Amino acid sequence: MPQPSPVPVAPVVPVSAAMRRAKVRAATEHTTVGLAQAGPGGTVTIACACGMTLTNGPTWSLDEHIRLHRAEARFLALAQAAPPGIPRLVEWPPRQPA
Ligand SMILES: [Zn+2]
């Protein structure tokens, strides 16, 4: 008696290579460069490898800016590399301002 054909299932890969690469690329492209520089009025800045200057502000510290910047970069990279159809918390691609 013939056996029913098995139901196809997606390969069991916890995290795809594309998403792993995206995370590593984001971490590499957003490392701080050089030393923190003290400026006038208590400002402290440091360069990021992406070209952006990270700084403290009236209500945030330099460390908070660095953490937010890295988190945003990681989010953008993972959101771009995520499989199509995956349920999301944040709309992707992001809506462009009118
Ligand atoms: Zn950066």
Image: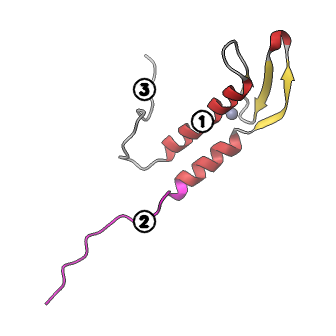
Q: Position of residue 24 (x, y in %)?
A: 64, 49
Is residue 60 part of the magenta span, yes or no?
A: no
The mark that comes first in sequence, 3 or 1, is 1
Say left or right for 27 vs 90.
Answer: right
User: Majority secondary structure of the magenta segment?
Assistant: loop
Q: Residue furthest bottom?
A: 1
In the depicted view, which residue is nearer to us: 83 or 63? 63
Q: Quadrant of ligand 1?
A: top right
Q: Examine the image and state in which quarter residue 74 appears.
A: top right
Task: Report the residue marked by disc 2.
Answer: 12
Could you tell me which quadrant the C terminus lies in?
Answer: top left
Q: Position of residue 54 (x, y in %)?
A: 73, 25
Task: Report the residue marked by disc 3.
Answer: 95
Task: Report the residue marked by disc 1.
Answer: 71
Q: Which residues are magenta?
A: 1-18
The kind of residue on which mark 1 rests is: Ala
The mark that comes first in sequence, 1 or 2, is 2
Few, some or many C-alpha atoms within 10 Å of disc 2 (few <14, some 14-19, many ≥20)? few
For the residues labelled 3 and 1, say whether their Cβ atoms are less than 8 Å apart. Answer: no
The kind of residue on which mark 2 rests is: Val
